[in-house]
Amino acid sequence: MEEPKIAAKFPKMVTLEPGTYYWCACGRSNNQPFCDGSHQGTGFTPLAFEIEEKKDAWLCQCKRSKNKPFCDGTHKEL
Ligand code: FES
Ligand code: FES
């Protein structure tokens, strides 16, 4: 499978209310770090994740974290 596009080599801090979110796994979304449907035809699908309580989170934009959708510092190696 092709590698995801690197949307940015740094994470994005977002404040998340409780709910379901769809993290962009392909790197092509124009609404990073979330999916906007641009993955169509790429073979990638977004990663759904649940937030139980409101919180701030650093979400991965390089698409290479081993703890998706959260940044784990892997972007520093790119
Ligand atoms: Fe990237 Fe949907 S736009 S997974
Ligand atoms: Fe991807 Fe940090 S932005 S691991």
Image (spheres, helix red, strand yellow):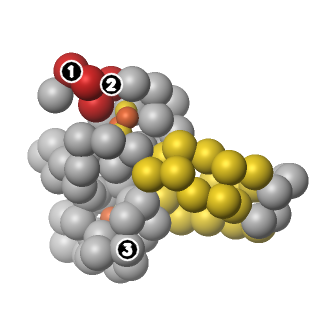
What residue do we see at 32% from left, 42% from top?
Answer: 10
- Asked if residue 1 lies left or right of residue 38, the reply is left
- Asked if residue 71 lies left or right of residue 31, the reply is right
Residue 31 numbered tag:
3
Q: Which residue is mark 2?
A: 74
- How packed mark 1 is, by other alpha carbons closer than 10 Å (few <14, some 14-19, many 20 or more), is few
- The answer to whether residue 63 is visible is no
First in sequence, mark 2 or 3: give its number.
Answer: 3
The three-letter code of the residue at mark 2 reads: Thr
- How packed mark 2 is, by other alpha carbons closer than 10 Å (few <14, some 14-19, many 20 or more), is some
The residue at label 3 has a CB less than 8 Å from ligand 1 = yes
- How packed mark 3 is, by other alpha carbons closer than 10 Å (few <14, some 14-19, many 20 or more), is few
Q: Looking at the image, do the residues carrying marks 2 and 3 touch, with CB atoms under 8 Å apart?
A: no
C-alpha span from label 2 to label 3: 21 Å
Q: Secondary structure at mark 3?
A: loop
Nearest to the observer: residue 24 or residue 33: 33
Q: Quadrant of the N terminus?
A: top left
The residue at label 2 has a CB less than 8 Å from ligand 2 = yes
Q: Which residue is mark 1?
A: 77
The three-letter code of the residue at mark 1 reads: Glu
First in sequence, mark 1 or 3: give its number.
Answer: 3
- The answer to whether residue 40 is visible is yes
Please tell me whether residue 38 is drawn above or below residue 55 in the rendered image.
below
Q: Looking at the image, do the residues carrying marks 2 and 1 touch, with CB atoms under 8 Å apart?
A: yes
Residue 18 numbered tag:
none
**The image quarter in which residue 75 lies:** top left
Q: Position of residue 69 (x, y in %)?
A: 50, 44
